[in-house]
Image (spheres, rainbow, N blue to C red):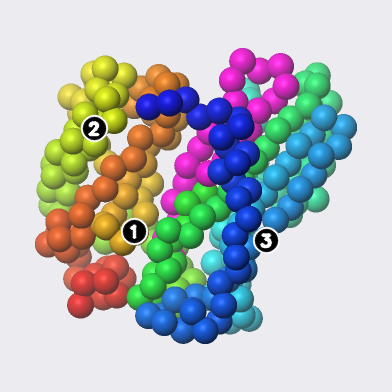
């Protein structure tokens, strides 16, 4: 797996996208949204944001937009024990300025791009890809976050909302087979932490896709930097047999 470079991140995050029309959103309970951007490049600080904003004034839409923005505007600065959440883009700029002044960095780069992975059947799923690099640090930090929403309620779905303990344990057992298959195809088996392989676990970071449920590990979580942020998918037929009947995904996807 190739290392994620800054050039790749920039090109990936800011490809021009066409706004989705309301007519298209009427199909299969999809949501209409437009792509918003924010660019700042002054005094050694480079910030680029790209994200979808759901159209409409209903409370559930505002809730989804707010949660997406919260994910974008969260930074774990180097050396900080906890992440800092900013209220808006202007607050983010000022927060980065304060950080580099206090820590004698010469500048800071922060990129956040949000892609819609699934938008149908009352499920709205996005992928948030962040990259941050303080000038003077050895390496930048990448993060990959999935957010799945019940579009009817504006509620974010968690993995424990859908699987009881026995179902989750079986999902993890089957998931290891799919993970190993993907790792072999990507030729990264030698990079995996042996302790992780002995005690395999599913990450809580999951996304609904057309093919199934995709899981993602963070950078350094199960191996060194060259491993990147590994992902793998458990197909819908496997999920369907294990998911709780009360789960939103069961009601919307599998009935």
Per the image, the residue denoted by label 2 is: 185
Q: Is residue 146 visible?
A: yes
Identify the image quadrant of the N terminus.
top left
In the image, residue 173 above or below residue 104: below
Residue 56 lies in quadrant: bottom right
Which residue was labeled with disc 1? 209
Q: Indicate the quadrant where residue 225 lies.
A: top left
Q: Position of residue 170 (x, y in %)?
A: 12, 48
Q: Nearer the viewer, residue 65 or 12?
A: 12
Label 1 sits on a secondary structure element that is loop
- Classed neighbour count for the residue bearing mark 1: other residues with Cα under 10 Å, few (<14), some (14–19), many (≥20): some
Give the label on residue 36, or none.
3
**Majority SS type along the magenta span:** strand
Percent of width and height locating residue 15: 60, 50
Q: How many marks?
A: 3
Please report the residue visible at 49 percent of the width from the left and 79 percent of the height from the top.
24
For label 3, the crowd category at 10 Å Cα-Cα, with few meaning under 14, some 14 to 19 and many 20 or more, is few
Instruction: Give the residues drawn in magenta, as a range.
Output: 129-150
Could you tell me how far apart the alpha carbons at marks 1 and 3 are, in whole angstroms?
Answer: 23 Å
Q: Residue at x 46, y 84 (%)?
A: 26
Marks 2 and 1, how far apart in space?
20 Å
Q: Is residue 136 left or right of residue 189?
A: right
Q: Is residue 146 magenta?
A: yes
């Amino acid at each position: 797996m190739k290392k994620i470079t800054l050039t790749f991140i920039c090109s990936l995050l800011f490809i021009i996208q066409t706004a989705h029309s309301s007519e298209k959103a009427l199909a299969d309970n999809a949501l209409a949204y437009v792509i918003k951007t924010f660019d700042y490049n002054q005094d050694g600080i480079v910030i680029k944001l790209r994200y979808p904003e759901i159209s409409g004034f209903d409370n559930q839409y505002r809730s989804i937009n707010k949660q997406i923005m919260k994910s974008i505007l969260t930074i774990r600065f180097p050396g900080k024990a906890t992440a800092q959440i900013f209220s808006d883009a202007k607050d983010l700029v000022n927060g980065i300025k304060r950080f580099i002044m206090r820590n004698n960095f010469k500048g800071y780069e922060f990129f956040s791009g949000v892609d819609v992975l699934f938008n149908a059947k009352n499920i709205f799923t996005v992928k948030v890809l962040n990259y941050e690099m303080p000038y003077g640090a050895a390496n930048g930090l990448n993060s990959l976050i999935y957010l799945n929403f019940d579009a009817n309620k504006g509620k974010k779905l968690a993995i424990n909302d859908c699987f009881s303990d026995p179902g989750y344990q079986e999902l993890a057992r089957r998931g290891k087979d799919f993970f190993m298959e993907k790792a072999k195809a990507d030729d990264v088996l030698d990079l995996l932490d042996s302790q992780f392989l002995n005690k395999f676990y599913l990450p809580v970071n999951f996304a609904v896709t057309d093919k199934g449920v995709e899981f993602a590990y963070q950078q350094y979580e199960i191996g060194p930097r060259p491993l990147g942020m590994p992902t793998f998918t458990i197909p819908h037929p496997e999920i369907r047999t294990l998911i709780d009947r009360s789960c939103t995904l069961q009601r919307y996807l599998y009935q």
